[in-house]
Amino acid sequence: MKDETMTDQDKQSLIERAELNKAQEKEYITAEQVQAILNPLIEAMKKSAFTDDYKATTEEALGIILAKFYEWNGNKILKASANALEDANYHTESSIVSDLAQLGIAEIKNKYTDILNN
């Protein structure tokens, strides 16, 4: 009769395969799907947040959406921006923005005020 006792390595291998299968089952959201969801909101923001004679950009409207979503919390806006840069493979830029977020808005203001006043 074959020994049915699993080694720790066998158990770990099964766990890793199960995790891989679970990850592969996740539904991937494409850039096109995100755009399809956000574009109507962006267009509505362009119409409601700007004067009629101003042609707002998508970046401006999305910035206002982000600000409203985070209830004008600068640190959260910076963190979200850092994550967006990271996802787009702008790792150096993401690191800089992350550092700013960790520093905090109040401290950034203090540092830049000192720099500008000197």
Image: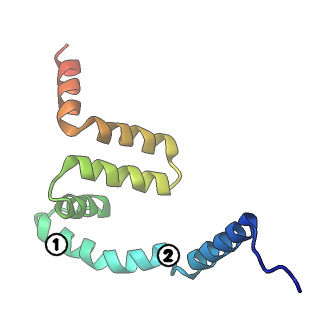
Disc 1 is placed on an element classified as helix
In this picture, is 32 found above or below 113? below
The reply, left or right, for residue 93 in relation to residue 15 is: left
Disc 2 is placed on an element classified as loop
Q: Residue furthest right?
A: 1
Residue on which the image places disc 2: 30
Image coordinates for residue 18, horizontal then vertical, percent: 63, 77
Image coordinates for residue 24, horizontal then vertical, percent: 60, 78
Local crowd size for mark 2, using a 10 Å CA cut-off: few (<14), some (14–19), many (≥20): few
> What numbered label is drawn on residue 57?
none
Q: Nearer the viewer, residue 56 or 98?
A: 98
Residue on which the image places disc 1: 47
Q: Earlier in the sequence, mark 1 or mark 2?
A: 2
Q: Residue furthest front?
A: 1
Q: Residue furthest top?
A: 118
User: What amino acid is labelled 1 in the image?
Assistant: Lys
Query: Which residue is drawn at the image coordinates 21% and 38% (left, top)?
Result: 105
Q: Nearer the viewer, residue 88 or 101?
A: 101
Image coordinates for residue 8, horizontal then vertical, percent: 71, 65
Query: Which residue is drawn at the image coordinates 63% and 79% (left, top)?
Result: 21
In this picture, is 77 found above or below 55? above
